[in-house]
Image: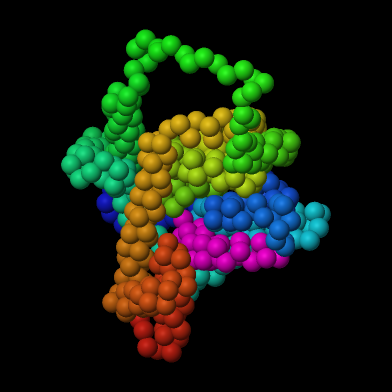
Amino acid sequence: MGPGSAAPAAAQVHALGFSLVQQLTVIGVCALTAYVAHLALAVFNDGVRPFMLDFVHGRTTRGATAAVSFGLSAGFIFGLGAPMALSSGVLNPWLMFLPTDILGILAPRKWLAPLLGGAWGALIVFGLRGADAAVHGLPVDFLTAMQQMATPILFLFTLFPVLAITKQFGRARGAVAGAVELGLVVLTMKLWPQVFAGAPAMAAGVLLLIGFAVARDVRQRRTEPGSDAWAPKAPEAPQTPESVRAPEAPDPMASLFSASAARLRRHLPLFMALGAGVCVLAQMHIFGGGEATSFLIARGKYPEAAQVDLYRVLGFLPLIATTALASGAYGIAGFTLVYPIGYLLPSPWLAVLCGALVFAAEVLALSGIGRLLGRLPSLRDSSERLRGAIGDTLHLAILFGSLMAAQAMGGGLGILIVGGLYLVNEAMGRIVVRMAAGPAAVIVAGIALNVLYGLGLFTPAAVS
C-alpha cells in the first residue's frame, strides 16, 4: 500500500542487505568523513561546529572537543539513528556521520582517523544486518512494530510550513495555509493515490511562506525613508581628502569570516571528494537524509524524498553557512543539496560528478552567501522558523509513532512502558534528547517484553 494511504505502514522494503559495492561505498564514505573531521574541516553535528573554532586555533584539546561531540551526539546515534535504520531499512546521517565526527576528532593521528571511520562503516553494514535478523526472530518483534512510526512521521511532517507561517506571520495566515494543505492532501489522496499525499501540500505551504516573506520585504522597502530606488539622489557631500580621513576600524567578524572561507577553499579537492561520496550514497537509495525521507526511500518514493530534503536545505542553509564562516568547519553534507540531487540521478557515475561540482560551488560561494544572508533578515527569519517547525512536527510525529509501535507490540502494557520511559526521561532533565527518547523507549520496551515473555508473564500482541 502506498504512503498516500492512512493505513498502517507496509512491511519494510529494505532489509539492510547491501551489495559489495554498497558496502564499500558506506565504508569509504565513513572513512573519508572521519578524516575530514580529524582535520577540523567539517563535522555533521551543527551543535559541535561552533566549538571547532577553539580547536582549530589550539585553545582546546582534541580529547575535550571529542567529549563535547560525544555528549551532543550520543542520544541521536543510539536513540534515533540506529532505531530509524532498523525500522526503515535505510541508513541515515545520525548513524553514519555523528560517530565519524567523534572518531575523527578523537583520533590522535591522521592515518588512524580513516581507519576508525572505515571500521565504523563496516560495523554498520555487517552489524545492523545481524541485529535485524536477530530481532526479527524474537517473540516480540519490536522492529516490525516500529514500522508503525512511518505514517505519523510522513503525514505530520506535512504540517511544518503551517507552523512556520503561523509563528512568523500570525494565526490568520497560518489558518489559511493549514486549510490549503488539508485540501491538497484530501485532493491528492482522491485523484492521485500513487503520489505521497503530503508532497503537494508541503510544496504549497513552503511557497506560501516564501510569498509572505517576500511581500513583507517589499512593504518594508517601500515604507523605509529613502528606499525608493527610482527617486532622484540627493547631492553627495564633499569628499574628505584621503590624507585627512580617519582610517576605518577593521570589522573583526568580517576578518574571521574571510579567513574561514579561505581555509575551506584551500581544501577544495577534499570537499569535492566528500560531496561525490555523499551524493553516490544517496543515489544508491540505501541512505536517507531525514526521518520522513528514510521511509519514503524505503517505499521507492524518490521524487517525494528529494522534495522533503530540499525543504530541509531551505531551513538549514543559513545555519550551516554562518556557523561554517564563524568556525572554519563546514558541514559533512554541505548544505545537504547532494541528498535530493542524489536521489534523482540515474547513475552513480553521474552522482560522483554532480556531488563534486555541487560541493565545489558551495565552498566557493560561501563568502557570498554569508554576505547575502546579512542583507536578508526576513529570509533568515523564515529559515529559522522552518527549522524550528521541522523539529516540532517531527517530535510529535516520532512520539506518536513510538506509542503506536508500543500498542502494536504490547498493547496497553507496551504503551505504559514506552510512555512511562518518555515521561521519566522528561522528569530527569532529558537524559536522552526529546527526538530520540521515543524510539529508544520502544527498543527498551521491546527487550523488556521479550524478557516478560520468557518468564511466562506476557503474551505478544499480533503485529499488523
Residue 302 seen in the figure: no
Q: How is the image coloured?
A: rainbow
Question: Residue at 34% across / 57% down in the picture?
Answer: 397
Kindly indicate the quadrant of the structure image that contains residue 98.
bottom right
Residue 321 location (% of width, % of height): 55, 40
Q: Quadrant of residue 247?
A: top right
Residue extending farthest front: 244
Q: Which residues are magenta?
A: 63-88
Q: Is residue 316 left or right of residue 41?
A: left
**Total numbered circles:** 0
Check the picture and name the quadrant holding the C terminus: bottom left
Q: Specify whether residue 51 is in view.
A: yes
- Dominant secondary structure (helix, strand or loop) of the stretch shown in magenta: helix
Left or right: 323 as drawn, with respect to 315? right
Rendered location of residue 80, percent (x, y): 48, 62
Q: Is residue 11 left or right of residue 97?
A: left
Query: Residue visible at 44% across and 47% down?
Result: 293
Residue 24: percent from left, percent from top? 69, 49
Residue at image position (43%, 89%) is 455
Residue at image location 26% in from the left, 45% down from the top: 166
Measured from the top left, where is residue 75 in percent x and y?
52, 66
Q: Is residue 456 magenta?
A: no
